[in-house]
């Protein structure tokens, strides 16, 4: 065994032992949800809390647990790290099979190597499949019976959106466009780069999402920060921690909102019509800070990162300080729990599950920096008059076993053609479908002829 490997294994053991001594949360996780979360004094330590739920995958016959009145089934299985979903107008479901790209400067030194090891234990940081699959349910039984490779040779793809006959895909380093024909099960045409996105050897938050406005004239792209709290230097954060607005006609982009550490899910709230996003907030301030959040996104607004969190609470770790920017920071609308890794967002605007109409489903990937664990479930946040209202509701749970191991981890969420909820599980390699118990079949928009003589 080489000396370097011995030191790496020793360092990993020391960090995990020290992390095991880190302080547990003093508040119930419910205290970090809602419009007025509890924000105690920050806790700092030599080694941050590391409380990984080791990735195990689903045992045979075991599935997550849906809320009362709902059922869950595997819409598709055997995928390769499915993280994000997009439902085409014809009902076909696109799935980004993806993981982090090579980013050597993000894993330099002992700390970086240990961080990579920890991420692998949690089921991430493996070679990316770099493709998008198309799933189709042709008989309306809630299970995809057609599964094809739709696009391949991408670069850590994530967000997808269709405008007219153009499919936009957000790779980690660029926004791409591809020609699309209704009903196609594969795109072979060469994509065209329409906008370069921040990436490179240091590419901490690598996922880039994209959605279109309802008019189909502009795109909105989420770009996460290049660090936890700018510890690599503010010069490494140029073009980061923001949502961009891209004008399709002119091909020009501008910052739409900034100070968002790691925005992923975006959506248009059905009642108010505003753009909303969920944001994965900063780590290493203790088990009781900082809550992830969802917020309406205002044009030109600044949301605090890296100088402050949850409005104007100063993060003293950031150097140099910037009181002027802190004074501009807007408070988010609704907290989603400390370290829940809230990533997926899907507003509900259909009739199949009327109890959810107008509100938002949130995919919570799960914590690594909190004791006890948080997240690892899909929740629903009710809305009233265009704003979050009341406490969140559990929709899909059971992703952790009683040993604290992860059978799966929910990420992207989407609403299928019938109104059921789809959930991408990148540890279980499954797309789950949640629907009312009473729904047995539905009329598939891509239903194939049943007569044997028809092709």
Image (spheres, grey):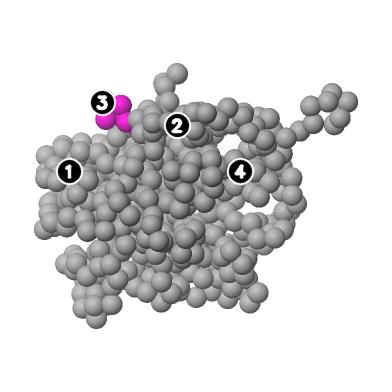
Residue at the disc numbered 1 = 28
Total of numbered circles in the picture?
Answer: 4
Secondary structure beneath label 2: strand
Asked if labels 3 and 1 touch by Cβ distance under 8 angstroms, the answer is no
Q: Earlier in the sequence, mark 3 or mark 2?
A: 2
Q: Are marks 3 and 4 in contact (CB under 8 Å)?
A: no
Q: Residues within 10 Å of mark 2 (few under 14, many from 20)?
A: some
Q: Nearer the viewer, mark 4 or mark 1?
A: 4
Q: Are marks 4 and 2 in contact (CB under 8 Å)?
A: no
Identified at 43% across, 31% down, the residue is 69
* Main secondary structure along the magenta-highlighted residues: loop
For residue 387, side relative to residue 367 (left or right): right
Residue nearest the observer in this picture, 28 or 205: 28
Mark yes or no: residue 72 visible: no
Query: Does the magenta segment cover residue 403?
Result: yes
Residues shaded magenta: 399-406
Q: Quick one: label 1 or label 3, which is nearer the N terminus? A: 1
Residue 295: % across, % down = 36, 62
Q: Is 74 situated above or below 44?
A: above
Q: Which mark is residue 417?
A: 4
Query: Whole-Å distance between the Cαs marked 1 and 2?
Result: 27 Å
Cα–Cα span, label 3 and label 2: 26 Å
Question: Looking at the rendered structure, which numbered label has been put on residue 403?
Answer: 3
327 vs 22, left or right, is right
């Amino acid at each position: 065994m080489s000396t370097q490997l011995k030191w790496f294994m020793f360092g990993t053991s020391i960090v995990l032992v020290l992390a095991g001594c880190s302080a547990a949360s003093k508040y119930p996780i419910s205290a970090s949800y809602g419009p007025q979360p509890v924000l105690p004094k920050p806790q700092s330590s030599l080694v941050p809390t590391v409380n990984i739920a080791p990735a195990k995958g689903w045992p045979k016959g075991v599935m997550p647990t849906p809320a009362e009145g709902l059922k869950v089934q595997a819409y598709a299985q055997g995928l390769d790290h499915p993280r994000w979903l997009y439902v085409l107008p014809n009902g076909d479901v696109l799935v980004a099979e993806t993981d982090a790209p090579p980013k050597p400067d993000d894993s330099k030194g002992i700390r970086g190597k240990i961080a990579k090891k920890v991420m692998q234990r949690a089921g991430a940081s493996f070679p990316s499949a770099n493709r998008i699959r198309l799933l189709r349910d042709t008989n309306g039984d809630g299970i995809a019976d057609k599964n094809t490779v739709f696009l391949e040779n991408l670069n850590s793809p994530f967000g997808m959106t269709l405008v007219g006959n153009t499919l936009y895909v957000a790779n980690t380093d660029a926004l791409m466009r591809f020609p699309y024909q209704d009903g196609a099960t594969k795109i072979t045409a060469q994509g065209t780069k329409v906008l370069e996105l921040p990436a490179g050897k240091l590419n901490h938050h690598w996922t880039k999402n994209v959605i279109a406005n309802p008019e189909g004239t502009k795109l909105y792209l989420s770009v996460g920060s290049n660090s936890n709290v700018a510890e690599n230097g503010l010069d490494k954060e140029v073009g980061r921690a923001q949502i961009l607005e891209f004008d399709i006609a002119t091909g020009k982009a501008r910052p739409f909102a900034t100070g968002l550490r790691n925005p992923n899910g975006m959506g248009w709230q059905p009642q108010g019509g505003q753009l909303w996003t969920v944001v994965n907030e900063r780590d290493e301030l203790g088990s009781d800070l900082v809550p992830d959040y969802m917020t309406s996104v205002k044009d030109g607004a600044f949301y605090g990162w890296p100088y402050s969190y949850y409005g104007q609470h100063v993060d003293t770790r950031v150097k140099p300080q910037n009181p002027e920017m802190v004074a501009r920071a807007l408070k988010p609308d609704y907290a989603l729990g400390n370290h829940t890794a809230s990533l997926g967002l899907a507003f509900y605007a259909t009739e199949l599950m009327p109890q959810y109409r107008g509100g938002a489903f949130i995919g919570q990937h799960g914590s690594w920096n909190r004791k006890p664990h948080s997240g690892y479930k899909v929740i629903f946040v009710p809305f009233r008059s265009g704003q979050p209202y009341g406490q969140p509701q559990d929709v899909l749970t059971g992703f952790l076993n009683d040993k604290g191991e992860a059978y799966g981890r929910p990420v992207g969420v989407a609403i299928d053609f019938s109104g059921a909820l789809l959930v991408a599980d990148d540890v279980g390699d499954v797309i789950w479908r949640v629907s009312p118990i009473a729904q047995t079949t539905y009329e598939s928009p891509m239903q194939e002829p049943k007569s044997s003589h028809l092709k």
